[in-house]
Amino acid sequence: MQRSAKVAYIWLVMIATIINAQSNDYKWIPVNTAPLDIEMNVVQVLSSDFIVAGGKNRTFTKTTDGGDSWTLVEQPGGILYDIGSIYFVSELVGWIADEHSRDIVKTTDGGITWSKQQVFSTGIGNIVSLKFFDENNGLVLKDLGDIAKTIDGGDSWVETDVPGLTFNGMDTFSQNSIIVFGERGTYYHSKDFISTWEENKVIQDSIGSAELLDMKIVNENVFYASGEDGLIAKTSDGGETWLQISYTPGLDRAYSNLTIFDEMNGKVQINESSIRSSSDGFSNLILDDTQELLNRTINDFDFLDSQTGWAVIEPYALLGNSTFAKYVEAEPTSVENDAISPAKYSLSQNYPNPFNPSTTISYSIPKQSNVQLKVHDLLGNEVATLVDEYKNGGNYSVSFDAGELSSGLYFYTLKTNDFNETKKMLIVK
């Protein structure tokens, strides 16, 4: 078996084992009460009722009743391009930035009216992040390293440069703990409200060129980082040393949009349409139930707490052109064994199919048996073992993540002591 196939096999077996062992009590569903057809880039959840978002066609929207109704504002404050960043500190006060301007716009009445604020002296580079500590103190970062701060709500700004890199974003714990991150596994840490910067690396080896796609500060000592090459890393000493929880140079797997609830619990996005949860500091990742989103691209998601989250997704006709999804409690079901055993063996067609990157395979066995569920490619090579154990009679489901496999036709086979059946499934990327 070639090295790339071995890597894919290892990842698939690990993921299948984890998902088989646990089931999520929550799932993602499309929300058709939100504005349709208009694709959103960013979302922020301030409370279970108050959610704001911005996106294509220079559009801002908000809800104050948990998504039952929405207010839509086109081109707020005369903004010229698609909205790429958003940050509200209350239901009244917030800022948004378009993707290509030196300016941002501010509201103090919940988005009814907006005023423009010039942050940077030049228009070179794109604004990639807004962060505010309160109504007066805040930061704006450009991808080329320009960063500005305000202490008066944006009436005036002080610019400075972060040396060296192209940046993807920033995170803050306080005015005395600010990080900006980007290419070559490198980030910069300021402990004096961006007056000075310390250069640090998450990846220390000579191969390490993984781009950092997100970082989060949990407290003064604990940071998490995620990025390309399947990178998730953690420091417990303020960045002096880093533990690489996962990292494979050359692996086509991007971890982004880190969401941290506490030091052990959080979520991360993998590539475009997969969200994973962890309860052990990202050592193991459990696939969120996103089946109802039909593998659409997830542009952004945000959580108030571990049970209250919203995502903005790529519009799709089969979802009624929904552009929002909500994290909701699933109706009680048993992923493992139904109370009444089925009358016969069966292997269901995977759903969704075609799929990218994940799908669910369901099967039934009427009595106790050794069970194997395996996936093979067109040449008959085994690429994943999803189940290989003794099970009681019942109905079962297993999630299969094919993120490391190429597009094409694959076969999955259920084999027991008395039953053997194979079905086809199609990966489309």
Image (tube, grey):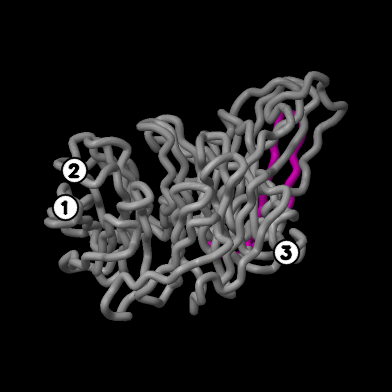
Q: Name the residue under label 1.
A: 200
The crowd level at tag 2 (other Cα within 10 Å; few <14, some 14-19, many 20+) is some
Which residue is at a point 41% across and 53% down the rendered structure image?
Answer: 255
The amino acid at mark 3 is Asn
**Res. 56 image quadrant:** bottom right
Q: In the visual, does 219 lie left or right of 260?
A: left
Q: In which quarter of the image is the N terminus?
A: bottom left
Which residue is at a point 61% across and 55% down the rendered structure image?
Answer: 62
For the stretch drawn in magenta, the main secondary structure is: strand
The secondary element bearing badge 3 is classed as loop
Please tell me the numbered disc located at residue 321. Answer: 3
Q: Mark 2 points at which residue?
A: 239
Residue 280: horizontal and vertical position, in percent?
40, 30
Tags 2 and 1 touching, CB below 8 Å: yes
Q: Quadrant of the C terminus?
A: bottom right
Q: Give the range drawn in magenta.
A: 405-427
Q: Which of marks 3 and 2 is nearer the N terminus?
A: 2
Q: Is residue 257 covered in magenta?
A: no
Residue 398: horizontal and vertical position, in percent?
64, 38
The secondary element bearing badge 1 is classed as strand
How far separated are the C-alphas under marks 2 and 1? 7 Å
Q: Which of 203 and 393 is in front in this view?
A: 203
Q: Nearer the viewer, residue 172 or 198?
A: 172
Q: In the visual, does 46 lie left or right of 428?
A: left
Tags 3 and 1 touching, CB below 8 Å: no
